[in-house]
Image (tube, helix red, strand yellow):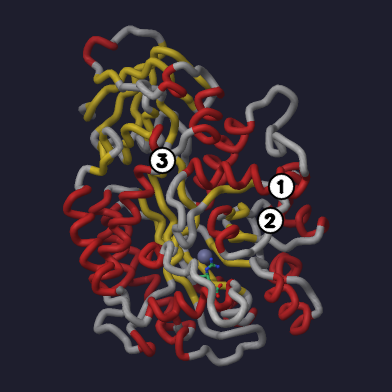
Amino acid sequence: MTMLRTLFCPQILLADGWAANVVIAIDGHGRIAGIERGPTGSAHAEIVRGPVVPAQANLHSHAFQRAMAGLAEQAGATEDSFWTWREAMYRLVARMRPDDIEIVATKLYSELLKGGFGHVVEFHYLHHADGGRRYDDGAETSLRILKAAETAGIGLTHLPVFYAHAGFGGTAPNQGQLPFVHDVDPFLKLLERLAPACAAQGARLGLAIHSLRAATPEEMRAVLAAERTGGPVHIHVAEQEREVEDCLAWSGRRPVEFLLDEMPVDDRWCAIHATHMTPQETARLARSGAVAGLCPVTEANLGDGIFPAADFLGFGGAFGIGTDSHVATSVAEELRLLEYGQRLRDRRRNRLASGSGASVGRTMFDAALSGGGRAAGLDTHGISVGARADLVVLDGDHPFIGTASGDQILDRWLFATGSDAVRDVMASGQWVVRDGRHRDEEAIDRAFRDVLVKLA
Ligand code: NGQ
Ligand code: ZN
């Protein structure tokens, strides 16, 4: 096969650690075809302008929610909570049309690339129009997500979401939830309809169950028994204390306990949030092989609580990061707050480092890369032969980045700077961000502004 391009990387974080003077060959499918150590071959390669690290997979996104980021920060008449925020989110849903969904998702995905993500897992439940009215094509909004990912140039794992009820015990959905709702059979048809569309674009298809609140165990079993995606299975679980109380009242068991008892949870699964767990649940979830899908900035914004990350890692648990409601859109902000939440709770420092002398940034970065890749259904992750060329070039001219080496580069990026340290981003072998700007930034911004004005 002909090589699409070769890159000369003065410093690079390969799957087996940092290396100097490496030539990466990328083939016409956007995959890494060769890694050559030592400066030979550099003459014909493009020289990257800073340290290279793998792009992360973002394991949890509701793209449309980017439109309301920053607009739910005003105190209401009653005490504000996750549940009052959700009402505001439902009001946004009622006003969004397919064009708006695509434009907002395109903008979001371009921002995620600039924040150091090369892939996104879209947990997609906004299937129908206001009041639950069906579009002519039941896959309309999913196809808009596929289109947005293609325009932005980000890798996609699409997870259509099964949603049927307002709460535990199969209660009827409320008016605001009607755009999310399916019966089991139409949901399975949606998955079938999307398989070829995803395959044509190189996107992965999996599925999600919205939560134990939104699906009965019978429905979950029926969906899982019949689906043929072969992709990951995600579910929101134990994000809010009220969910724990309601689950106890309904079943006598806590949400994570119930999930692990009743469902075939294994390494194909991703438990989103899993904030409220007993130590026993934390150990069981870790040993199940499921990835914990952590979204630290959204979890802070919504007042969810703090995930027991230090304990979970101690039990050998795998995690990845997502940006969920997208009040932040960067790898650095999510990982930084993940560590800081542990510090604030424990009143200690360096909680998530793998051991004495280990860098917190490196430990978290490696763990999120592997857990996020698995939760996205990717067969490979990290910079290795056969993996997709999803690369972040940090800014070698930035004082902090240019003077650092090895794991210090990650600690400077994650703890001392942020997205302004991200210079160029390559997804599937294409440069999508150059000098901190997305390749279509102007057109994307123009359309996005119009949508914000319309929705205001
Ligand atoms: C969601 N978002 O589905 O968008 C949820 C809120 C719910 C977050 N949990 C709705 N961040 O859980 O019922
Ligand atoms: Zn979510």
Q: Amino acid at mark 1?
A: Leu
Q: Which of the two residues, 423 or 348, is positioned nearer the viewer here?
A: 348
> Going from the N terminus, do you reach mark 1 or mark 3 first?
3
Q: For residue 344, which numbered disc appears in the image?
A: 1
Q: CA distance from mark 3 to mark 2?
A: 24 Å
Is 221 above or below relative to 232? below
Q: Nearer the viewer, mark 3 or mark 2?
A: 2
Q: Amino acid at mark 2?
A: Ile
Residue at x 35%, y 35% (from the top left corner)? 389
Q: Residues within 10 Å of mark 1 (few under 14, many from 20)?
A: few
Q: Quadrant of the C terminus?
A: bottom left
Task: Indicate yes or no: mark 2 CB to ligand 1 under 8 Å.
Answer: no
Is 182 above or below relative to 394? below
> Image quarter for residue 191?
bottom left
Q: For residue 116, which numbered disc appears in the image?
A: 3
Q: CA distance from mark 1 to mark 3?
A: 26 Å
Q: For residue 260, which numbered disc appears in the image?
A: none
The residue beneath circle 2 is 306
